[in-house]
Amino acid sequence: MSGEIFNPNPTVFRSSAKSHSSRSLSTAKKSLWINEPEWSQPDQETDEEEEAIDQDEIFDLIRNIYDPEHPNTLEELHVVSAPQIDIGENRVKVEFTPTVPHCGMSTLIGLSIRVRLIRSLPTRFKLDIVVKPGSHQSENAVNKQLNDKERVAAALENPALVKTVEDCLTGRV
Amino acid sequence: MTSASDSTERLVRTWMASEREEEIVQAVSGMLRQISNGSTSLLNVVKALGEYLTSEEDALRTKGKLRFPLEEYHAINLSILGVEFLSAVLGRCPPEKLNRQAGTIYTNFYADIAQRGIARVLTSFYCSKLEDSETVVPALKGLVSLTKMPSSTSEDVPSILDAIFTHVKMKGLVQSVRFFVFTIIDTLMARHRQVIKDMNDSFLGRYIALVDGEKDPRNLLVAFAIDRVLLIEFDINNFIESLNSTKSLFNITFCYFPITFRPPPNDPYGITTDDLRQALRKCLNSTPAFGPLAVPVFLEKLAAGSPTTKVVIFLISFQTAQLILLKRDTLESMSMCFPVYGSALARSHARKLWNSLKLEIFQPTDPITEEFALKTTQDLVKTIYTSQTADGTDSNIEGLARDACEECIAILREPEKSQAKPAIKILCAFMSTTPSVSRYTVAQTAPYLVKLYAHPDNVAARPSILLLLSDLIAAARNSMAANKVDDSDPLDTPLSPYKDEILSIVSSALKVSSSRDPALACLLGLVSTEKLVSDEELGFIVHTVDEILLEESDEAGETNVPALQLLVTISQKAVHHIKEQTLPLLFSMLPEDAPARDAALDRARAWRILSALNTVCRPLELFETLVIRLTTRLDLLCVPSETVPLPADREPRVAYAHSILITLHQTLLSKVDDGHADVAKYIESLVPRLFNLFIYSALVSNEVNPIATDTRLITVAGQIIGTVVQNTAAQRQDTFIQALFAAYIDGDINRIAEGYHKFPKTSSFSPLNDLSPLQQRNLVILMASAVVPLHKEIQLPVSDLSVFLGNILTWSLAEVEAVVDLQRESTWKMISAILNKHASFFIENMLHEFWPRHIADRSASAESRNRAIRPWVWISKALLVCNHAQASQFADVIFLLFDDEDIKWNAAKSFGDIVRTDTILTKQNHASIKMLYAQRFVGRTLPRIIDGAKDSSEPGKQLSYLVALTSLISSIPKALYFHEMATLIPLLVRGLDLPDHDIRCQVIDTFLAVAEGDSPDIVSDHAPSLITTMLKNSSVENMPSVKVRVSALRYLGVLPNIVRYDVLHPLKATVIKQLAVSLDDPKRAVRKEAVDARTKW
């Protein structure tokens, strides 16, 4: 871990509140009543409707991970975005975009995403974390490292590395 | 006199000879008593001590003759004791006893100097004792007391100081003794400053040597105070810095900077790091002479606090925290010192200072330090440019401000990059420095950003540019307040030259959705700037914003909050634009009739407009329009004209009417929160109109079935009426309540319900009649809402209150089809509110007739008995809250039901209901609420309930007690039961096995409440059983209720924060494994809590 900063001045995007944008519409679809008074809500105890894990939920899990180099979240730097998440029956594929092609922090970012998802998703899911094709000069190496069970396990044995990952996850920068 | 001196001598001898602490203390206090009552004098004390005081010298003199070393030792020792004793007496002696009364005094020992007074004698005596390392401690102690006496004179000062400087070796003394030295100097400095000033050089040099090397915080606080006086008032030129030695004023202050002291835990002296910092800072900024020496120190300390990269932070985060604090201290000290050190110095070091401050801002270690650095930069700029008179020639700002501005503007060339943010922050900070710098900054930045925006290459970056611009506008606005010299000074607004350009780019930006929010932020800044935007321009802005509202109404998005915020801000300045432009637009967008059931988009749109109206229509004029427009809309909706048939599906229309009423209520509530006085006047218009609509609907309900008979609408209407009555003066309430009762009891509805609809002549209004139809009876809800908030002094217009209350209670319990729960609850709330304010014989009736007949009688039906518990709870509540004498009786009888299978569950649960705060008996409703009523109730009932819950002899009863316990605990604040927590936890854990989901949820919430605050680790002993139970309650197979699952997971997430890790470690693997199950919960809310909990573990 050198002291070199790979991208000292990245572009910051304004984070959109998009996942909430159509909230009133969806409530309007469900109910005739404004502000959902208690008596208009179906009894939760008997509500058996299943809410499956979707793209937005996974995005919510990783959007607030901090970049190791900057006091910005991955969402603000457009490293991750909802459309880059693909979810299947028991498989989740997350694609992320490093801010610069030579970014040496890519594996760290990928590892942070992986750790976050290992902790937060049911064990039935298989995780694939990849950099966006063509966005990194050593794309294959990074992908290989991120999806190799042994290498990930070995990385998580390294206390300094785990600490760094924890800091990215909690934003303690 | 003789006897007095005898007893004095006796006391002195006791002191000398005794080894026992209490006798010594007695001797001192006995002596003091004698001095205070005048039976002896200090002189006598000195006399009596005479032989001991001189004994040392005798001993030395006779040293050769002494045979036994022991004797010599003893003699010296006695001398020390003598000095000590004198100091002890002096220290506690009332000052007036030490005055210069010594004219007649004679002692063989002090014969030659007696006329000069005791104080004088003592002073020189003590000073002579300083020479001796054995007596130095008590002598200093004595000097501390003596110098504080009014009788100490300036003549003594040089000799005292000389003695101290010559003889006292600070390095060899312990802290407490060094403290005496500092105290003496401090006292002398305070009382005889001129004398010391006259000494100047001879004092300063030796003082510096004395202080050098001091480390104790207590001493340093005194030393810093002395240092400040020296630095400000003395001629210090020769002592600022000495080339050949470290002993200089600069050295004895700056060697402590920055303060790294951290008080040990439980520090008895209570000196904080901040005390020291403040004291030291006062020294640092007390003389400009420090300037040239200080700047390099500051720069060095600042650089020392900078880890080179973030990666380093990860590794040494503990030390980093300390470093950051030091850095903030340095920055703050710099801020305070620059103005003292002067602009010339600041200017000459500006470059260097800026270079290191810049680093703190562009690569901040944390936001707070960044803030500090900005503040320091501001102070630096202020210091440099304050001296320049505001001659109006803004363009020739030279030096730092110019360089820094250019540097920042160069960075702004890439407005979307992360460095642009600190750059604009610096420019904004410059705005609040001096008027000339402020003008210069605006003149450089504003046109630059406008130009940047216009450049075709920057289309993608436009939102970022606008965001930067909005920061600049806000800073320009704030700077006007900061730079304002006085109120009369009409400062020109720095932005006015660029206003037109900005307005034109912003209004074009509003049309593009991506740049809309930042553009609105710019407008908000412009509009809230004083004297910047003309009325005409405001009208134009309102027009463009209205267009956005209109355009967005077709989309599915949320309400545009910034746009509304802008309109609200404009409405504070020019309400007519909103009234003339925005309101008509919004009302025209509000649909005439309810959107159909499947028209979700239309419904969402209508809601959005209502919420916009709610936000905008709070000012007096706008609210008036809102009330008129919405009630008209409501009337048309609820009572459509004959020609239009009622739709087959009533529900959407009811819901739409409901949302209109909710909007009115919410707007009213926010007006109450803002303290608007015009709420009260709506008792004349809005309230009668509502009564009119609802009574009319009830009366005609036989023929048609108007939607305003729906209880959900009546409930909201009741809330509106309640809010208005709450805020009405007592006098008006009185006439109102007369009219209300005339309507409800005598059927005279015309006084209360004036309005649009003409009541049918045929049917009469008698809601409180047992035989009335449901629709009329429901209107009791409105009556209750109006009665609950009455002032205490309002008498209800009934002949006998007790009879009236009895009647309505019977009415509410009547077993007729037309009674619904809502009517009942409203009636009981009304009874509760009345009883709380007016004592009545009704209470006796309740205890002696109602209780035995309706509740205690086990032959009655379980359903009616369970129902009768509710009014009982409401009445108990009313009495409890006002501390009525019979409140305890009402609660105590409930215990009698605990073995009653039919109703024990509800009876037990009522304990929580009785004490829980509610929306009826509140200060807003003018209820009479006594202090500590809940404490009294809990103190009385909790021990009994705990005993019952522990007593396993009767399992049925025990269960009731357990239910009562959970219900009570979850209804009261933590402080009321916290002292019992150790007993409560096992009981509460058992409560988690009760079948009732609500109870379980309440218990977990109680645990969550306990987890906050000072001593949350109280649950540590029960952690394993708690974890097992919580895990059971968190999985979907075992617990169908989503609410319980969420709470249980939340509690599991809290545990790692409150229980020590060594307790949790053995359970960690199980918990993490079990939580994985909840990660796959069918409900999203549960999964979210599971993720959080698992991350915590």
Image (cartoon, rainbow, N blue to C red):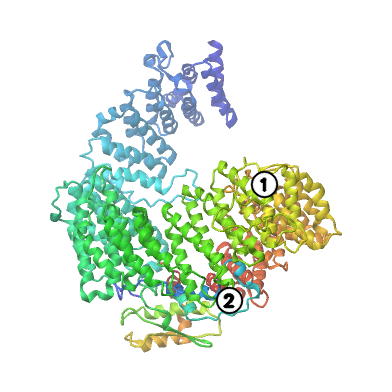
Q: Is residue B467 above or below residue B1075?
A: above
Q: Is residue A128 above or below residue B584?
A: below
**Can you give x and y, in whole percent of width and height, for residue B900 in the image?**
82, 60
Task: Give the chain of mark 2.
Answer: B
Single out the residue that lies furthest toward the right.
B859
* Amino acid identity at mark 2: Lys
Q: Is residue B689 left or right of residue B242?
A: right
Q: What residue appears at the point 43 percent right and 12 percent down from the top-left corner?
A: B106
Q: Is residue A90 above or below residue B872?
A: below
**Can you give x and y, in whole percent of width and height, for residue B46 in the image?**
46, 19
Q: Which residue is mark 1?
A: B834
**Can you give x and y, in whole percent of width and height, for residue B469 in the image?**
27, 64
Report the disc number at residue B1083. Answer: 2
Q: Secondary structure at mark 1?
A: helix
Q: Secondary structure at mark 2?
A: loop
Mark 1 or 2, closer to the camera: 1
Q: CA distance from mark 1 to mark 2?
A: 45 Å
Q: What residue appears at the point 43 percent right and 68 percent down from the top-left corner?
A: B559
Q: What residue appears at the point 25 percent right and 33 percent down from the top-left corner?
A: B202
Q: Earlier in the sequence, mark 1 or mark 2?
A: 1
Q: Nearer the viewer, residue B396 or B846?
A: B846
Q: Is residue B849 left or right of residue B494?
A: right
Q: Nearer the viewer, residue B531 or B747?
A: B747
Q: Nearer the viewer, residue B925 or B111?
A: B925
Q: Quadrant of residue B417?
A: bottom left
**Can you give x and y, in whole percent of width and height, for residue B494 in the image?**
22, 54
Is residue B465 shown to the viewer in this render?
no
Q: For label 2, count other residues whose C-alpha is less than 10 Å away and answer few (under 14), some (14-19) or many (20+).
A: many
* Amino acid identity at mark 1: Ile
Image quarter in which the C terminus of chain B is found: bottom right
